[in-house]
Amino acid sequence: MKHSTLRYLITLLAFFSAFTACEHEHFKQEFVSTDVANFWKAYDQINQTEDTLLQEQLLKELYLDKASPGLKDLIAVKRYTNKDFLTGITSYPEFWSSVKANTLKTKDHQKAINADIEKLKKLYPDLDPATIYFTIGAFRSNGTIKGKNVLISSELALASNDVKVQELPEWRQPFFADYKPLENLALLCTHEYIHTQQNELVENLLSTCLYEGVAEFVSCKATGKASNSPAISFGKQNEKKVVNKFLEDLYVAENMYNWLWGENRNELKVRDLGYYIGYEISERYYEQATDKTLAIKELIELDYHDENEVERIVDATNLLPKPVQQLYDEYENSRPTVKAIKEFENGSKEVDPSTKSISLTFSEPLNGLNTGLDFGPLGKEVYPKVDNSTRKWGADNASYSFGVSLEAGKKYQIQVSNFRSEKGLRLKPYLIEFETKK
């Protein structure tokens, strides 16, 4: 009996050991870093010649032609050209010399990265495997994704405090001290890993902030690490000020880079504050949820094309002072409009074909810069001949005119859009549609 029990226990132990091994093997993280070694071979050869044609040939043969799928994805996502790489390689010798050793030690960080991905798997059991590629780019990103590939740009992501940055553009230099990239490499990889699990982004300011904020919050929650983005701490300390400014920019497309992926040019100065907006929404949604596992799943798997679902999550947190729909309605009501056409009533079927210009009057003065005249729904065939040399603003920017050449007995359409108010609000789209007399 004792022998039978012992055999049973041994069999049971073997089963669980095999199950655990299979589970671990199934989610074993894959790393690819061949691009880094290829880059340095190309770098050394390129800097031995001043022949620009030869430099481009060496870049192609030694680096780009040997690109991993990850490097190919990085080039596509960041729209890198050969010139971008060559400019980076030849312009910053002290930087490259100081960062080289770090970039060649990617294997030293794989254990820590893998540990954080395992933590993410525990928090979000539906995690799909993604491959992490260590590449070297041309300073446009420390990390991004394409499909199920995490793309780490080692020239930025593996930079330590002692890297020499004085040669780099002034706007780029603070990144290294503010974000401490090498210290936070595993957290970056976890953040980007989450992006590989998310649905396709809809590029409006609110959804984009939420997309980034979800990845930042969930990566921090999974790993137990604080965000290395200065925007998070600044936002928490200045919530009202940041939210009020966010509302001003919410529907102003041109101000996207004040909040994400660019140098903030408004009075707040701190870059990437959109991460804070999304982080705060995610954190509040998670904290108030009864089912925390479900909350993480909902955040990661959010369908950004489902406006009702995006609004439900945002409104539930009360970060914004009003429901999203109400904010949108107020925005729509505040947009400038076309009040009238000077020469005829819109929709008229009796327009004189000898009319030489069309003059628009707006509900308020516009910025005098942005304009847009385009085909209407019926396309090119019904778009009149517009003399672009005659396009001009009225003295107060509350009107705009342009020369046209019309034919008798014909229907015309002109789509008016892209005009902006002085505050940057978009003109409500306006379709000019008319018919000329026969």
Image (tube, grey):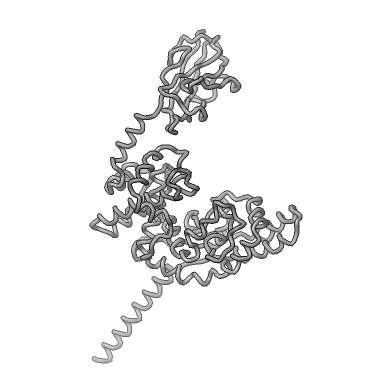
Q: Position of residue 235 (x, y in %)?
A: 37, 51
- Furthest-front residue in this view: 267
Q: Quadrant of residue 114?
A: bottom left
Instruction: Say which residue appears at 45% left-offset and 48% top-offset.
Output: 269
Q: Number of marks in the image?
A: 0
Is residue 20 positioned above or below 235 on the image?
A: below
Quadrant assignment for the N terminus: bottom left
Is residue 387 positioned above or below 71 on the image?
A: above
Q: Position of residue 146 (x, y in %)?
A: 50, 54
Q: Quick check: 4 left or right of 110?
A: left
Tell which of 83 and 237 is nearer to you: 237
Is residue 321 positioned above or below 165 on the image?
A: above
Tell which of 13 and 236 is nearer to you: 236
Instruction: Say which residue appears at 51% left-offset and 66% top-offset.
Output: 31
Q: Position of residue 329 (x, y in %)?
A: 32, 33
Q: Position of residue 392 (x, y in %)?
A: 55, 21
Q: Quadrant of residue 362?
A: top left
Is residue 276 positioned above or below 400 on the image?
A: below
Instruction: Say which residue appears at 40% left-offset and 48% top-offset.
Output: 209
- Furthest-bottom residue in this view: 2
Instruction: Say which residue appears at 43% left-offset and 71% top-offset.
Output: 25
Tell which of 238 and 394 is nearer to you: 238
